[in-house]
Amino acid sequence: MSQSAFITGATSGIGYATAKVLASRGYRLGIAARNSEKLEAVKQELEMKFNSEVYTYVLDVRDAEAIKQVAAQAVQDMGVPDVLVNNAGLARGLESYEETDEADIIQMVDTNIKGLFLVTHAFLPGMVKRNTGHIINLGSTAGLYAYKGAAVYCATKAAVKTFSDGIRIDTIDTDIKVTTIQPGIVHTPFSEVRFHGDKKRADAVYEGVDTLHPEDIADVIAFVLDRPLRVQISDIVIMADQQA
Ligand code: NDP
């Protein structure tokens, strides 16, 4: 049977590009995000273009109970996924810390850390039981080098890297792989989300910058997944050419 992958945040940007690349390679897909219409549109596109088997799951990764229910349903639909791509995540505001809204702090921590931890917690036991699986976690260069006004976002992405290293150690006696992908600047709706829908402010972030494309990250994910079993890639840092 073909390989399967469960991708959070698969309706936009990096997650969407990853869904397309994996679908083009014959993966069966479980795709999750909050917006059901976008999920259905992605499913239809993947079915049309690649004749893919796609299951959609409306999921807010901040909701612990919903994660358990969706994971159980996904396992019923497609089996324990061969690949879990923990991609759902966001930045909010990014003003200096004292000016950051409490709600934004909570949303970043609950999505980027708690959500990613609990989605992993829901799927990992099945992978361990089977002895195989590949967990791809979306960190960021923001988790490696803090920058001004982004203390919370950077801290959440540092947590993703440390968590990935921790579960890699925990599963060392299995054939499970854990990879943290740490991109620099990628042109996606990320900045619009960050600035609460202010497109003008979001566009200014990318002005004059030859940014990465979401497909660049998806291609790297596909490369990581294509390695033979003996190879474990712990981290990939991928930046735009002009970034240092
Ligand atoms: P996008 O805003 O384009 O996509 C984010 C995706 O996550 C959407 O599908 C969104 O769907 C989903 N999502 C957001 N919140 C939740 C939630 N609570 N529950 C479930 N799904 C959710 O962002 P990117 O593609 O740019 O970012 C993807 C990942 O890559 C993030 O973790 C981000 O931190 C990381 N990253 C991005 C970089 C960049 O420059 N763009 C650089 C480095 C890392 P919906 O709103 O329907 O839920």
Image (cartoon, grey):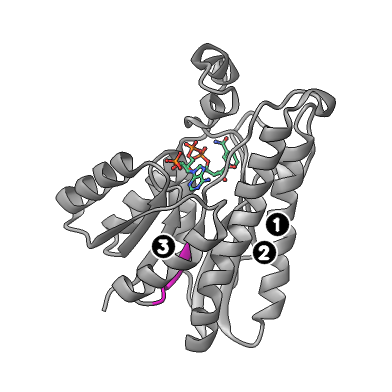
Q: Is residue 81 magenta?
A: yes
The span shown in magenta is 80-84
Main secondary-structure element of the magenta-colored stretch:
loop
Q: Is residue 130 found left or right of 4 in the rendered image?
A: right
Q: Residues within 10 Å of mark 3 (few under 14, many from 20)?
A: many
Q: Is residue 244 visible?
A: no
Q: Residue at x 73, y 70 (%)?
A: 166
Q: Which of marks 1 and 3 precedes in the sequence?
A: 3
Q: Name the residue rendered at 59%, 55% in the picture.
A: 115
Residue designated by label 1:
161
Q: Which residue is mark 3?
A: 6
User: Whole-percent x and y of residue 12?
Assistant: 41, 39
Quadrant location of residue 6?
bottom left
Whole-percent x, y for residue 54 in the image: 26, 59
Going by the numbered disc 1, the residue's amino acid type is Lys
- Pointer 2 residue Cβ closer than 8 Å to ligand 1: no
Task: Identify the disc placed on residue 164.
Answer: 2
